[in-house]
């Protein structure tokens, strides 16, 4: 059977290769493991909570309706960092395709975390579609404004923790020439470096990155992850390094930052704004590709 449901998880196994599978926690509809022919692709903290007591530290947490901690918006500023989707138990809607195995999860205010919904009493419907091919993982989101009279204003982001061998041998490519907001320096500038490299905590929001820029994670010259984005103009690149990792209780081992890089496709610099009845969709596609250094 290619789709197995337990009380807390959904596991998809590829019909042609049982070493290719994905595990999704209903809490947060969080993909917390993606094995591609026996090789884990996502980083997961060994102290990550998978019992619904807090968002998962690793995998692909979903950020909605606000990225980070908002200070200005009357409604969104009441929510905790990264919103409510990653701390709500989603409904498993079932399998929609046999091959590639594809499943859907849904979230709306009627089932979302009640404490957080009280802080942000909006009408919306989210449908997450997870498609696992023999060589790719696609996560697609559709957000609908189900209100009859109110605008829906939100951020979206796939907070993807990619597994790597060694952060000091790793580069992230094809973001050069893009404007970014550096969360460490609290300032904006254009990245003039040909690639992103890592020597300390790095937390950058690359803005308005064209859809046709394929972001690649490169290990000693070899591309290990390729990320295609659709309708997600921003890309957050994050590595917590030593001190930040020490400060996160659910981050283990403490030197685990060496084996992860977060590349997070999102819509976070601006808000998506939907009028009553409107919908918006976007996806992230993770796959393997040859080195594709784009001159843009
Ligand atoms: C990243 C942010 O997306 O998420 C960082 O850019 C933040 O600033 C990180 O530290 C982790 O956030 P959290 O809430 O999961 O600890």
Image (cartoon, rainbow, N blue to C red):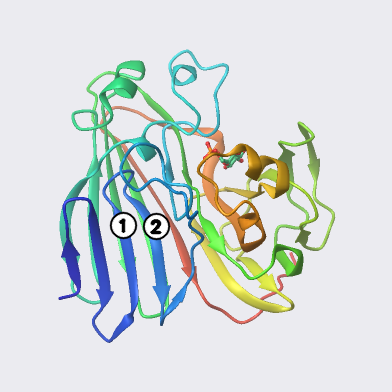
Asked if residue 243 lies left or right of residue 112, the reply is right
Residue with the mark numbered 2: 32
Asked if residue 196 lies left or right of residue 33, the reply is right
Instruction: Label 1, secondary structure: give it.
Output: strand
Q: Is residue 136 above or below residue 215?
A: below
Task: Say which quarter of the image contains residue 34.
Answer: bottom left
**Residue 24's disc number:** 1
Quadrant that contains the N terminus: bottom left
At x 66%, y 76%, the residue is: 292
Between discs 2 and 1, the one toward the N terminus:
1
List x then y, in percent, for residue 137: 40, 68
Q: How many labels does the image show?
A: 2
Q: Furthest-right residue in view?
A: 192
Give the Cα separation between the discs numbered 2 and 1: 6 Å
Q: Nearer the viewer, residue 197 or 75?
A: 197
Task: Say which quarter of the image contains residue 214.
Answer: bottom right
């Amino acid at each position: 059977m290619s789709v197995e449901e337990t009380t807390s998880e959904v596991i998809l196994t590829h019909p042609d290769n049982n070493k290719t599978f994905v595990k999704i926690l209903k809490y947060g509809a969080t993909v917390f493991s993606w094995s591609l022919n026996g090789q884990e692709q996502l980083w997961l903290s060994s102290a990550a909570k998978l019992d619904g007591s807090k968002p998962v530290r690793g995998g692909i947490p979903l950020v909605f309706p606000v990225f980070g901690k908002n200070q200005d918006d009357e409604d969104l500023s009441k929510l905790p960092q990264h919103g409510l989707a990653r701390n709500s138990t989603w409904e498993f809607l079932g399998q929609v395709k046999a091959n590639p195995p594809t499943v859907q999860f849904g979230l709306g205010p009627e089932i979302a975390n009640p404490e957080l919904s009280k802080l942000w009493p909006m009408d919306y419907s989210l449908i997450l579609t997870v498609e696992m091919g023999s060589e790719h993982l696609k996560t697609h989101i559709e957000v609908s404004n189900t209100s009859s009279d109110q605008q829906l204003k939100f951020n979206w982001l796939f907070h993807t923790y990619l597994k790597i061998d060694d952060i000091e041998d790793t580069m992230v490519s094809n973001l050069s020439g893009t404007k970014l907001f550096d969360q460490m320096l609290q300032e904006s500038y254009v990245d003039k470096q040909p690639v992103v490299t890592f020597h300390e905590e790095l937390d950058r929001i690359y803005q308005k990155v064209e859809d046709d820029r394929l972001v690649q994670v490169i290990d000693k010259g070899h591309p290990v992850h390729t990320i295609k984005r659709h309708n997600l103009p921003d890309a957050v690149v994050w590595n917590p390094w030593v001190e930040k990792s020490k400060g996160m209780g659910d981050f283990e081992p403490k030197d685990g930052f060496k084996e992860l890089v977060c590349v997070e496709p999102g819509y976070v610099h601006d808000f998506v704004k939907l009028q009553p009845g409107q919908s918006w969709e976007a996806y992230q596609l993770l796959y393997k590709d040859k080195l594709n250094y784009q001159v843009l």
